[in-house]
Amino acid sequence: MNNFFIVIPTRDRLDFLCNLLKDLNYFTPYISQVLIVDQSVDSMDEPLAGLNLGFKYTLVKNSRSSSVNHSRNLALDYYKDEEFLFFMDDDLRISKSVFDGIVSFLNK
């Protein structure tokens, strides 16, 4: 089951985003795409490249004048044929047990 498309809109909250991305490492076998839609002033390219992640991500810049809803909609341009689509806030923290519960529920 490698068919989870995860969208994370973010704006000037690098620390929160890094924590979420590290949490997503628990979910690596199930991730087909992680798309980060960034509206930050400062570039996140270098800090994110330094993270030890078990999955690939795509970083897309969006205008600061656009709404978070626009960022979510922009992400859909990258959607392929994944079975599950998750929109996650950048300040979300998820434990391994929660991921295990999600996978267990979806495998029923």
Image (cartoon, grey):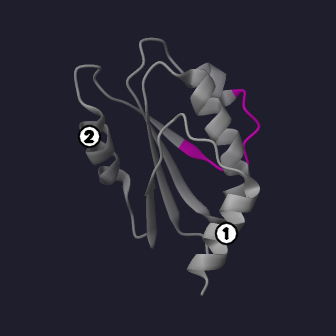
At label 2, the amino acid type is: Asn
Kindly identify the residue that appears in the image at 65 percent across and 49 percent down. 94
Of 76 and 21, the residue lying toward us: 21
Which disc is residue 62 wearing? none
Q: Residue at x 64, y 72 (%)?
A: 103
What is the span of residues highlighted in magenta in the rendered image? Answer: 50-57
Q: Nearer the viewer, residue 99 or 26?
A: 99
Q: Considering only vertical position in the picture, is 90 above or below 76? A: above
**Relative to 11, residue 86 above or below:** below
Q: Position of residue 33 (x, y in %)?
A: 52, 55
| Residue linked to disc 1 | 101
Give the position of the C terminus as an image quadrant: bottom right
Q: Is residue 81 magenta?
A: no
Pinpoint residue 7: horizontal percent, then vertical percent.
44, 48
Q: Which residue is mark 2?
A: 69
Density class for disc 1 (Cα within 10 Å; few <14, some 14-19, many ≥20) is: few
Q: Residue furthest top?
A: 42
How far apart are the two marked residues, 2 and 1, measured between alpha carbons? 28 Å
Q: In the rendered image, which quarter contains the N terminus? A: bottom right
Which residue is at 53% across, 64% downward? 4
Q: Given contact means CB atoms under 8 Å apart, are the residues at marks 2 and 1 in contact? A: no
Residue 5 to residue 90: above or below: below
Of labels 2 and 1, the one closer to you: 1
* Residue type, mark 1 in image: Gly
